[in-house]
Amino acid sequence: MVYCLRWFEAFWGWKHVRGGQQCSWIDFAGRSARATIPSPDSIATHSIMKPTFNIGIEEEYQTIDPETRDLRSHIHAELLEKGKLLLQERVKAEMHQSVVEVGTGVCSNIKAAKAEVKELRRDIVKLAKENGLRVASLATHPFADWRVQEIYPDERYKHIVEDMQLVARANLIFGLHVHIGIEDRETAIHMMNHARYFLPHLLALSTNSPFWLGMNTGLKSYRCKVFDKFPRTNIPDYFPSWGEYENFIKLLIKTNCIDNAKKIWWDIRPHPFFNTIEFRVCDIPMRADETIALAALIQATVAKLYKLHTANQGFRLYRRALLMENKWRAARYGMDGKLIDFGKQTEVPARDLILEYLEFVDDVADELDSREELNYIHTMLERGSGADRQLRVYQETGDLKRVVDYAIEETETGLEEDEPASVRKVG
């Protein structure tokens, strides 16, 4: 079994910290390990260290009633409690009682991440079936009504609902979050600045939410528009330095806009507790292989941007307003629309730009050992996104319950052991 250390334990689980001292932590399986905490004198060299580009992946699943195909609370089935016995801290609740989130540990490469994502999916699918539920990987439910969904009994969610009222209650959406390890915060803010350009491309690939309240919304990612109602969402502005970002956060806290930086819900953000940048733009895809492909592309993007950064080169920084034009196109049309190539100042089919994107990261694929996983992007371009496939099922059957059935099947697809691949492709 591939072993990945939990994000929390990797960055915050130290029992006692002193410069240069050997300290221990306990991983999620209860095993102990040892590591040396850097002394203050060594911290000065930290900023020139190459990032680890470690990966952490979080997926949010729907818990489904197998008879009605509607969302159903996992509370009475005690899915979370039983899940924690098996998966410990890798499974947790979200704001609504029909949402279950699972998260990998810190994975050193995409193959470790793939093994853990599939293991987590297998375990949660099995647990759900054993307790009279099913699991679907959809970014919105095709016909569920958020007005009858219960909020999970937790103080954090109680405060969010109190603060944002119906905006919070209506936020019945399901996403994919990918963390990439960048230990130096100054480097992280620059990588975030440049990576913003690619967020619409990632969204177009991941779109998986065309339905809302039983209606075809006409959008490939309606999840984006639901989440837009929250404050501090969407693509962020760029920040010239980590210090300016910190001052921004301090101002929001000082003026009672937020009480901590976790209430920054941008499509990409420096994580407030982990030494990562977190990509939050993607709809949760149906298949595990799609999740892995997107995570591989995100990791490769950061690695390529860092490569340019260290060569005193950089990707051009565009204004947020321009990037938001592309995000709208991605949400509306997915892979079938056109995005704007701002360098050429022209529209280009999204699929063509995604192929160019793969060429852009091709030279880091072998260094990251992610060529096989990146190649699945070509499969996604051929098969269409989850939204495309949902719409095809609905056009063929006229039945949204059949769409849910299809999503349940796709959620369970590809969880067996992988066969070795020998395709070069990528870009």
Image (tube, helix red, strand yellow):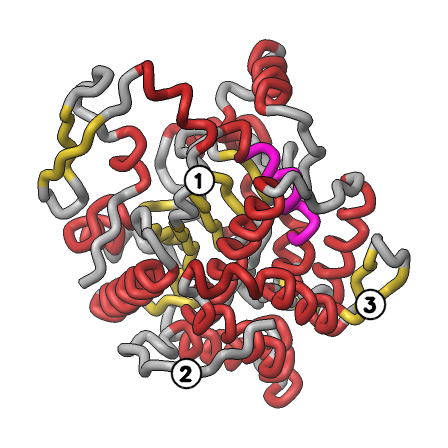
Disc 3 element: strand
Residue visible at 89% across and 61% down?
346
Q: Is residue 391 above or below residue 173?
A: below
Main SS, magenta region, reads helix
Between residue 172 and residue 184, name the one nearer to us.
184
View extreme (top): residue: 254
Residue bearing mark 1: 50
| Number of other residues with Cα within 10 Å of mark 3, as a class: few under 14, some 14 to 19, many 20 or more | some
Residue bearing mark 3: 348
Residue visible at 53% across and 55% down?
298
Is residue 131 toward the left or the right of residue 312 in the image? Answer: left
Residue 192 in magenta stretch: yes
Residue 383 in magenta stretch: no
Q: Quadrant of residue 19?
A: top left
> Which numbered disc, 3 or 2, marks the residue that appears first in the sequence?
3
Magenta residue span: 188-198
User: Of the numbered discs in the image, which one, if any, rests on residue 422?
Assistant: 2
Label 3 – label 2 distance at C-alpha: 31 Å
Q: Amino acid at mark 2?
A: Ser
Percent coordinates x, y for residue 15 in the rendering: 17, 24
